[in-house]
Amino acid sequence: MMTRVDPALADEAVRAEGPQAVVIGAGLGGLAAAMRLGAKGYRVTVVDKLDVPGGRGSAIWQDGHRFDLGPTIVTVPQIFRELWKTCGRDFDQDVNLVPMDPFYEIVFPDGERFKAQQNTDGMRAEVARLSPGDLAGYDKFLEDSEKRYWFGFEQLGRKPMHKWEDLIKVLHIFGMLRADKSVYAHAASRVQDERLRMALSFHPLFIGGDPFNVTSMYILVSYLEKEFGVHYAMGGVAAIAKAMAEVIEWQGGTLLMNTEVDEITVEKGKRSYKTTGVRLASGEEIKADVVVSNADAGFTYNTLLRNVRRWRWSDKKLEKSRWSMGLFVWYFGTKGTRDMWKDVGHHTVLNGPRYQGLVKDIFFHQDKLADDMSLYIHRPTVTDPSAAPEGDDTFYALSPVPNLHTDDPVDWAANGERYRQMVQDFMEEKLLPGLGDKVSTSMFYTPEDFRDRYLSPYGAGFSLEPRIFQSANFRPHNISEEVDGLYMVGAGTHPGAGLPSVITSAEVIGKVVPDATPAKAG
Ligand SMILES: Cc1cc2nc3c(=O)[nH]c(=O)nc-3n(C[C@H](O)[C@H](O)[C@H](O)COP(=O)(O)OP(=O)(O)OC[C@H]3O[C@@H](n4cnc5c(N)ncnc54)[C@H](O)[C@@H]3O)c2cc1C
């Protein structure tokens, strides 16, 4: 990849002809926004403090193992294909996306397993095996899910939501679909078996939401998984990020890595402020007509716009908002294990003894770590042997934990290694016998790493929690209400976290940013 890494090149980007756009952050949302702006005729400069593009979707190599740091499950692949098409390119030429079958396996505390899959008969057979009486309720749940997909994802998610009238027009549909109910409450109204209730309701945890409190609109995930499949990008999501960076450079854009933005610069406009570009931590300025921030929305408002008077997202409002949970992620390699643990697939959810109680502890008792845990376990080597040296395995185990949004947060410097050992012991007992003797390389991220690496407020794994009053018009808008020429993309903005949402937030950017007009481009 030709990603440029020299901050001095900022100067070259400024001198290039045509309307200038700066994108702060090369997360998947930022890269997608840059591609959209490139397609609209802007000269785009993407600036990121990390050394590689991808943000949470980047990877780190250690001792021959590729650790995909964050997202592993790719859903709704057509939104990537549409993005590439907008740029005059073919996604499938650049990225090798493979379908997963089964999607993932859920292991319950009683040892029972549930294989989520695309095949309807196979999925119904799994439901019937666990709880035959719940089959009719499951069928109904899928119908409910489809309705919420068409409304929540297609109608709301892919459109700008910064005007009250856009929200008011659809309020009655929220009412009809009982968006006030939680995901869990909806699942519980359709099926009786607690294991099935978990299997149908845990998805919000993948975007930072508490299933017992986030709106039941998020049951739409069951439909989109079933309809469009669950996929894996060969080379990890980092391969998608790399392909996006290459499209941006092919469009004539520039990526400045290892470069932190200190402030979004503004001048006073007629009604409000107008952006003039960004100032880097080095003190250099990049002038721009349009700035898109893919930095966390909270960080954008309280740090990058610290000198702007903000009427909507004040420091106080951000402080009072609900933030998604933190994540503890243990990345590890194991030696000579490719033929071991044959019943452990690419994606496993390993449940501990409690569901509701554990979720409550994570979201409401932030000053302590629970003694039990539930894990999502990623074993990419099942699909993609290139993630490890031959015969070895690469894994990560993700445990949702409290974020740092409390007066007395967990001290991870003191507790990190102890917690890692707990994760290892739990997996060794329930899933990977003999694990301790096989670990050959290891590293872990705590909420403190999320705070420091991604500048994520309170070390939250997924920015603002997707509660109903922090969604759609109530979430940070894609078009800034404080500063003309400033736009926002990514997990903390409408429509929310997760790859499909951050890619569609860039689609919204494509709709609200004016085209780079030929007159200006002269
Ligand atoms: C462990 C984990 C697992 C996940 N699994 C899945 C999954 O399987 N499927 C799925 O769909 N989603 C998953 N997600 C969610 C998904 O990864 C995220 O919602 C999404 O990648 C966020 O993208 P983003 O565009 O908001 O930017 P981010 O990835 O958050 O990137 C923002 C970028 O901005 C940069 N930045 C911030 N401030 C500055 C600054 N001042 N100057 C310069 N650069 C700056 C950061 O360095 C970073 O690179 C997962 C997330 C995590 C953490």
Image (cartoon, rainbow, N blue to C red):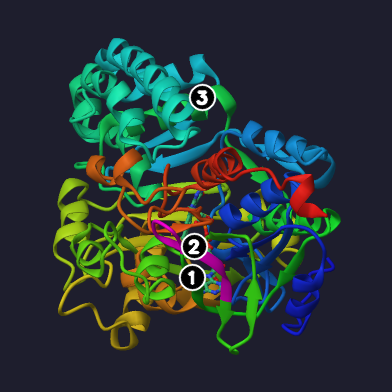
Residue located at (62% from left, 51% from top) = 33
Q: Viewed as shown, does residue 34 lie left or right of 116?
A: right
Alpha carbons under labels 3 and 2: distance apart: 44 Å
Pick the front one: 513 or 154: 513
> Can you tell which mark lies on residue 274?
2
Give, as a three-letter code, the residue at label 2: Lys
Pick the front one: 72 or 12: 12
Cβ of mark 3 under 8 A from ligand 1: no
Would you place residue 265 above or below residue 273 in this image? below
Q: Tell me where the magenta segment starts and ends, as one range.
A: 269-278
Q: Secondary structure at mark 1?
A: strand
Give, as a three-letter code, the residue at label 1: Glu
For the residues labelled 1 and 2, say whether their Cβ atoms are less than 8 Å apart: yes
Q: Quadrant of residue 379?
A: bottom right
Give, as a three-letter code, the residue at label 3: Lys
Is residue 272 on the magenta stretch?
Answer: yes
- Give the residue pinned by disc 3: 226
Q: Earlier in the sequence, mark 1 or mark 3?
A: 3
Q: Secondary structure at mark 2?
A: strand
Q: Is residue 350 visible?
A: no
Q: Earlier in the sequence, mark 1 or mark 2?
A: 1
Q: Main secondary structure of the magenta part?
A: strand
Q: Please rate how many residues cluster around mark 1, counting C-alpha atoms within 10 Å: few if below 14, some from 14 to 19, many from 20.
A: some
Alpha carbons under labels 1 and 2: distance apart: 5 Å
